[in-house]
Amino acid sequence: MHPIIVRNNVNVIGEGSQVIVFAHGFGCAQNSWKFITDAFVKDYRLVLFDYVGSGNSDVSQYDYHKYSTLEGYACDVVDIIEALDLKDIIFVGHSVSSMIGMIAALQKPEIFKKLVFIGPSPRYLNDKEYVGGFEMSDIEAIFMQIAQDYVGWTKAISPAVMQNLHRPELSDFLQECFEATDPSIALAFAMATFKSDSRAKLKQLKVPSLTLQGVDDIMVPLSAGDYIQQHTPNNFLKVMKATGHFPHISEPEETIREIKSFIEGKYEKKANRNVLT
């Protein structure tokens, strides 16, 4: 078996020819996609993986220097695609994986056909007129909480980011995902995420992309999605009915519907008719 496949615990499922690569966000693993994958397996070939340090990846391959930036994770995405000899893929990334996917698409644009960003942010920190949602003091407090009491932080953050208090089982699932990650690796990933600034890269992206954004998302304000749409060529923005930062978990049917609409070209058709909403 190819060492990259082992390193990132890569799993390929599905019966179709069109490939979709699903990339999980911070603190999660490939099992976070389990609420939507059944809807794609009959018509698509799905590639699921864990970032090094997450899920069932080979943690011995973790390199704190390499993964101190999103570029290190993007290199792994390209490694996986090349190890499987894939072309014209649809990349679906959640949260920070949205920008990781964009960086990978800038490195190897010929590999990518379309990108789907779920809850993306090009910059989490507020910066002059740009509203990312966090001040530096907020970020430093998050780092301190993770470092001092990771389990306590996961218990507090899970319901807050899920934003579905009437369904506590969703927050419980997310908390279990978070707690499966080594606290030191979680802190390093958080630092790479919150210190990143991908705004200048957006204008370089040529691959068509879709931004899916939930409402009442404490991690990503609507201004971040607007910024991506305004500064990225061929980007469509859809504000979903789903609440919170994990619509693929809390509202899988809506998420599935929007991803399929984009893959099937319905967003482009609507835009050409000037009726995109």
Image: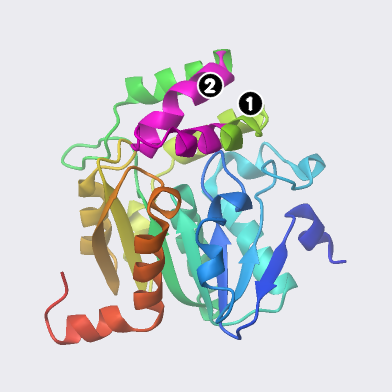
Residue at image point 20% right, 82% down: 270
Q: Please name whichever residue, 107 or 39, is drawn nearer the observer in this view of the structure.
A: 39
Taking the image as shown, residue 117 lies to the left or right of residue 56, namely left
Q: Are marks 1 and 2 in contact (CB under 8 Å)?
A: yes
Q: Which mark is residue 212?
A: none
Any part of residue 195 in sight: no
Report the amino acid beneath label 2: Ile
Q: CA distance from mark 1 to mark 2?
A: 7 Å
The amino acid type found where label 1 is placed reads Pro
Mark 2, Cα crowd under 10 Å, few <14 / some 14-19 / many 20+, is: many
Using the rendered view, name the quadrant where residue 210 is placed.
bottom left
- SS class, disc 1: helix
Q: Is residue 95 left or right of residue 5?
A: left
Q: Residue 171 location, x and y as percent?
A: 46, 34
Question: Magenta region: which residues?
Answer: 149-175
Give the vertical position of 80 relative to 90 (above or below).
above
Front residue of 246/189: it is 246
